[in-house]
Amino acid sequence: MRKFFAFSLIIAFFAVLSGCDNSCSGADTSEPSQEPFSVTSGETTIYPLGHFMYGTQYDEETGQGLAADGFPQLAEWADRLESVHYEQNFALWVRDEQTTLDISIAGIYANLSCEDIAALPAGEYIVACRLTTQGEYVEKANDYNSSTSVYWFRLIKS
């Protein structure tokens, strides 16, 4: 029964993550955001559309893991992406310090830095930012719980 309960909690955890729609363009930026990720450029701050990609959760007693995958379809969401015009103060913000950020331009570049984005020629780009959050270390599994989501937005460089 205990294993069933733990398994049910894990399934519920991934179900909640897969249903997140983190688009909040009307959010009040005067207070610290509860959103996991934001983009600021000029005086504009956006909270890009996010989607669960994959994660792993381990049982502390047995070390057995459960992995879950989501299948974000950019084509289905392309018309819902927020846009931001590139300005000199362009910045990406991640709320959780246990999260790593991987930036790519859809279909063109991967593993970009903000300096790489600054060097891009004028144009419109779809930017994908993968956030991987490292959870607790599970000794029996010799690994960490983790979760990865992707956040998309349009970047316009003049």
Image (cartoon, rainbow, N blue to C red):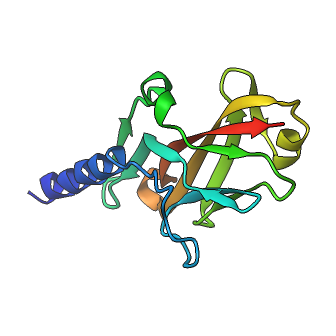
Q: Position of residue 126 (x, y in %)?
A: 65, 31
Q: Does residue 85 lie above or below 88 as drawn?
A: above
Q: How many marks?
A: 0
In the picture, measured across the screen, residue 140 lies left or right of residue 37, that is left
Judged from this view, the residue extending furthest toward the left is 1
Q: Nearer the viewer, residue 54 or 126?
A: 126
Q: Nearer the viewer, residue 49 or 9?
A: 49
Q: Which of the image's four quarters has the C terminus?
A: top right
Q: Which of the image's four quarters has the N terminus?
A: bottom left
Q: Position of residue 155 (x, y in %)?
A: 70, 39
Judged from this view, the residue extending furthest toward the right is 119
Q: Residue at 56%, 76% (x, y): give it.
A: 32
Q: Residue at 51%, 55% (x, y): give it.
A: 25
Q: Position of residue 121 (x, y in %)?
A: 88, 30
Q: Nearer the viewer, residue 12 or 84?
A: 84
Judged from this view, the residue extending furthest toward the bottom is 31
Q: Residue at 14%, 60% (x, y): give it.
A: 2
In the picture, measured across the screen, residue 70 lies left or right of residue 12, that is right
In the picture, measured across the screen, residue 50 lies left or right of residue 41, that is left
Q: Position of residue 134 (x, y in %)?
A: 54, 57
- The part of the image, by quadrant, that contains residue 37 is bottom right
Q: Nearer the viewer, residue 149 or 106?
A: 106
